[in-house]
Amino acid sequence: MKKVSWILIAVFFVFLAACQSQQSVSGTADKSENNDKQEDTTDHKDKDQPSEKTSGLPKQDKKEKEEAKKAKPSYEMKDNWYLKPINGEKNKKVILLTIDDAPDKHALEMAKTLKKLNAKAIFFVNGHFLGSDDKKAELKKIHDMGFTIGNHTYSHAYLPDLSPAEQKKEILQVNDMVEKITGERPQFFRAPNGANTEVSKRLAKKEHMTLMNWSYGYDFMPEYEDRTKLTNIMLKTNLLGNGANLLMHDRDWTNAALKDIVTGLKEKGYAMLEPDKIKRINE
């Protein structure tokens, strides 16, 4: 009798061990199956939906700017500071918009106005306006909106009155500041009052900046410090013509007149030339 009891007990423990083993294998399989399902879900998401890291596509403005840079230049600057087509586009009426002394008071607002009007422009900056974080942020916004940033010296000094070393500092300091803020060094240089020197010409060439004065501008004259008067002269001057390089400034009256000027130019059949289509000094 005792022998039978021990046999039954032994059979019971063998059966119990087998059940536990089966349960353990089943749990491992379920866990593995769940992991596979999670991996399948992740793979499906990666294929059909961009992840947080890849969903941030470049801004349209940045994409357009990169594409424009890759395009072959179609205009070049002539000695009279008018722009002429290199090949083709001879029947297209274009003008170039430029804004000096940015970012003083209205540069960002002017950029927004131009953006709404789908009008490109070059903003020529003075380094002394970039002393605060707010102004640096303004310049970054203007750049990120797709506008070209040019060098207009640090303090708007009259270059012929400065030593070569002082001229170099006036120019290079701005290039460094703009690059730090926007990630790009300026590719256009405009001397205050249009007064270039042999030093500024050599330095601009070394820095791969195209020299740029202007065809006409009036908003720095006291008689045109008025929205209506400025608009009229900008649209009716006999200097307005195909390839004209228009000079404007970051001023109250210019800011007020900007929409009317651009709208009037478009009504006359002019398109706003994209700065990236201008042949650079190193091209």
Image: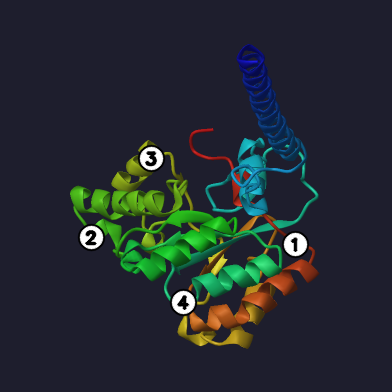
Residue behind mark 1: 270
User: Callout 1: helix, strand or loop?
Assistant: loop
| Cα–Cα gap, marks 4 and 1 | 24 Å
User: Callout 3: helix, strand or loop?
Assistant: loop
Mark sitting earlier along the chain (3/1)? 3
| Cα–Cα gap, marks 2 and 3 | 22 Å
| Cα–Cα gap, marks 4 and 3 | 29 Å
Residue 220: mark in rendering: 4
Question: Residue 179, position in %: x, y?
Answer: 40, 49
Q: Amino acid at mark 2?
A: Asp
| Quarter assignment of residue 130 | bottom left
Residue furthest toward the front? 1
Residue behind mark 3: 207
- Is 171 situated above or below 103? above
User: Callout 2: helix, strand or loop?
Assistant: helix
Task: Report the number of discs.
Answer: 4
The residue sitting at 62% across, 76% down in the picture is: 258
| Cα–Cα gap, marks 3 and 1 | 32 Å
Q: Nearer the viewer, mark 2 or mark 1?
A: 1
| Cα–Cα gap, marks 4 and 2 | 21 Å
Residue density around tag 2, few if under 14, some if 14–19, many if 20 or more, within 10 Å? few
Q: Amino acid at mark 3?
A: Glu
Q: Amino acid at mark 4?
A: Phe
Q: Is residue 197 visible?
A: no
Question: Residue 159, position in %: x, y?
Answer: 29, 58
Task: Report the front residue among 149 and 141.
Answer: 141
- Is 23 situated above or below 194? above
Residue 161: mark in rendering: 2
Residue density around tag 3, few if under 14, some if 14–19, many if 20 or more, within 10 Å? some
Q: Nearer the viewer, mark 2 or mark 3?
A: 3
Q: Are marks 4 and 2 in contact (CB under 8 Å)?
A: no
